[in-house]
Amino acid sequence: MRRSKRGNLLALGDKYRIFILFIVVFLFMSLFAPRFFNLFNFTTILNAVALNAVVAVGFTVLMICGHMDLSIGTTITFAGALTMGLQPYLGFAGAIVIALLGGALVGLFNGFLVAKGKINSFIVTLGTMTILQGSIYQFSGGNSISVNTDQVFVISDFLQKNFLPLLTPRTILVAALVIVMEFILRRTRVGRNFYIVGGNRNTAWLAGIATDRYLIAAFMLSGFTAAVGGIITALVSTAATLKLGENSLMYVLTATIIGGTAMSGGKGGVVRSVVAILSLEMLYTGIILFGLGNEVKIFFAGLILAYVVLYESYATYRHEKTLGQRPELMKELESGLVFKAKA
Amino acid sequence: MKRITLVIAALLFGAVLVFAQGLSAAQQANLKASLALEPTALALKSADNQFLLAPSTDNRKVPARPADPNKLAETDPLHWYDMEWAGWNVTPTNIPKSPADGAIGKKVIMIVHGDHPWTTACILGAKKVADAYKWQFKALSPNWDKNVQDQLIDQAINEKPDMILLIPLDAKAAVQQARKINQAGVPLHMFNTLPDAAALNFSLGWTGPDDFGQFRLLARAWADALRKANPVAKEIGVAYVQHAPGGSPYFARSFGPISELSTYAPEIKTLEKASPTPATFDANTTMQLVSDWLTKYGPKLKGICAADDSAQALGIFQALEKAGRTDVIVVAAGNSKQGMDLVKDGKLFGITYQTAEGDGGLAAKSAVDWFNGKTLPIRQNLAQHIITKADVAGFYPPQW
């Protein structure tokens, strides 16, 4: 009985590990990091996570389906470049629509090759990443793109303005997207089907789920959210730099894994990924506030990722080792209950 | 009762006056002490035994701006007007007034562009000035990520420093960064990489290397050497290994010499120009890039100009050695140990004197001047010089 309670506690700890990490980091930094616990800093953290949080929405859904999108970084840059580059011809509204469509199209291309062409998503998205990189350089002429209008500063100021304590329009937008996506994943049949497709594609197909459509949709969502992230960041910065999304892939991938989304698919959640991003950002901010260097930040990011990957490997090993075992049945057999009942 | 209230009010008023005068006296004393430190600061030296604070004595006339520089050909020096001469025509807005209370004990945050041995030397140079004036000094690095630099700016504003010293990671994105710092009421001084001219509207000033000017100087020396080595050639093919795209060095260190040579030595033709990808400052990636050029152009390629004299230059010479070429004349930016050793060995023909410590030092000294009540020039370049085999010995030990 005692072992069972301990087991339950461990299982709970495992289930809610990202929330525990969040609370631990928050409390530690609030207590010890200088100037961490104040509204300005919290707003800064929330603004800082906006790009990666929005990108993590689509990336997590795709990972739940058992695939990965290496092209998210270049899609971010691509969408940012389209927004700024097309603004003089189409205005901001037109340019943003084209950039969103562009992101979704990149996802459609990836998804089609993976679902229909049966090519590994790693290879496909690596190829797309390279193609997009070249296209961006061609489009921008090797330079960052900005627009010569005061309107961009008005938009940038609006996106960064605190309308409520802690919340700016860009954080509200990201929060809304996260809540909607989490609701779809948890509460609708469409959402649950993503988990079934990721858990076992054959079973999903046998259950009558159009697996290819779900895969393509997940890739499109990944491209779309990357585009949203790129557009918002370019508008806030008032310029689309050529390295806008360069570091997002590693960041989002790390956070998604830390958040508990299985790389093999079928498990995870959008909120968990975003909480992981928040935890990492608080950790990084704290490191800066402690006056420690960038190398310390990289060291901690690596340390956390290494721990989570090792833990995931151990969990998978333990799961495979106990696959098919029925400890309760063994207990019943040992106690002789089964045969007594038959007799 | 009334009388008592009046007496208390008078006492309070007197106390405030005395306190205010006391503060003012303290500020005056601080300013006096700060000004007295001027000779100490000017005597500071960088690791290469050069004076740390060496502003340019160049007094070229600023040309008139063409109506639309972008309409001019990229080989026309005036096409690059807004980058090369950025800052001289700006109208500073909402610039805070100097407190004129001295530089001693100020809190200054320096935000650089990324981790690199050059950056370490640059921070060291700033720290020498910071230590002289007993600053609370902190340097933050975003590791070449513009988004992280934005966050660091927010963090810095949160700390309410007396000044932020910023190396903008991206010329165009620097406008909003500078605007944000300015709106937060924190004095800003930019340095090293040139931002778009509009960013200087919100900055006390800019200090740093005159990349275009340095590379025009280097281009002329390079052209003379190329002509000397190829006296009968009607066309001399050259290539440019570029800096990371986006920043001012990307343009200055390739289009600077290209536009200079279009008039000074028109027989020198550009065969290729590219930034090594995915790693701009990686010897192996540069070696592959240059090897491809050597295969493609063979003996037609007579010269290479690199944006970096360390990893890029090493990669170039690895490729040249593999191809068995000793006739290619190579020049580069910077004076790292690797670069200076290559010049000393007679491999690199020339490098620009890019004092890393001096760059950080001059930015910090500008802050000192502003705290001391001086008006800063909107733009102040570092001294220009081309290091060749003839004088390289004078620049040892290297700064990085």
Image (tube, rainbow, N blue to C red):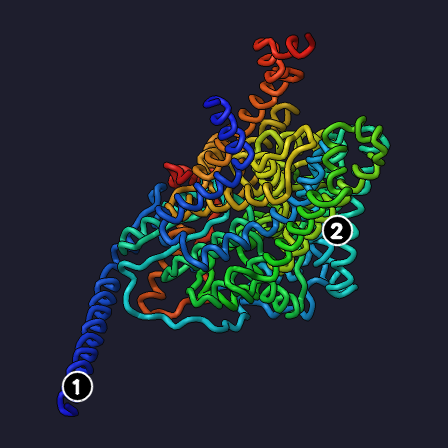
Q: Which mark is residue A250?
A: none
Q: Position of residue B340 (x, y in %)?
A: 46, 36
Residue corresponding to mark 2: A139
Q: Residue at image x 33%, y 65%? A: B371
The crowding category of the residue bearing disc 1, from other C-alpha atoms within 10 Å (few below 14, some 14 to 19, many at least 20), is few
Quadrant position of residue A91 = bottom right
On screen, residue A183 versus residue A20, left or right, reads right
- Where is residue A51 shown, x and y percent of the image? 61, 50
| Dot 1 amino acid type | Ala
Q: A134 and A117: which one is in front?
A: A117
Label 2 chain ID: A
Tell me the quarter of the image containing the C terminus of chain B.
top left
Say few, some or many: other residues with alpha carbon within 10 Å of mark 2 (under 14 / 14 to 19 / 20 or more): some
Among all residues in the image, which is located at the extreme bottom? Answer: B2
Helix, strand or loop at disc 1? helix
Q: Classify B12 as above or below A153.
A: below
Q: Measured along the vertical axis of the image, is residue A333 above or below residue A230? A: above
Q: Which mark is residue B10?
A: 1
Q: Is residue B270 visible?
A: no
Q: Quadrant of the N terminus of chain B?
A: bottom left
Answer whether residue A259 is visible to the viewer in this image: yes
Query: Mark 2 falls on what kind of element?
Result: helix
The three-letter code of the residue at mark 2 reads Phe
- Chain on which label 1 sits: B
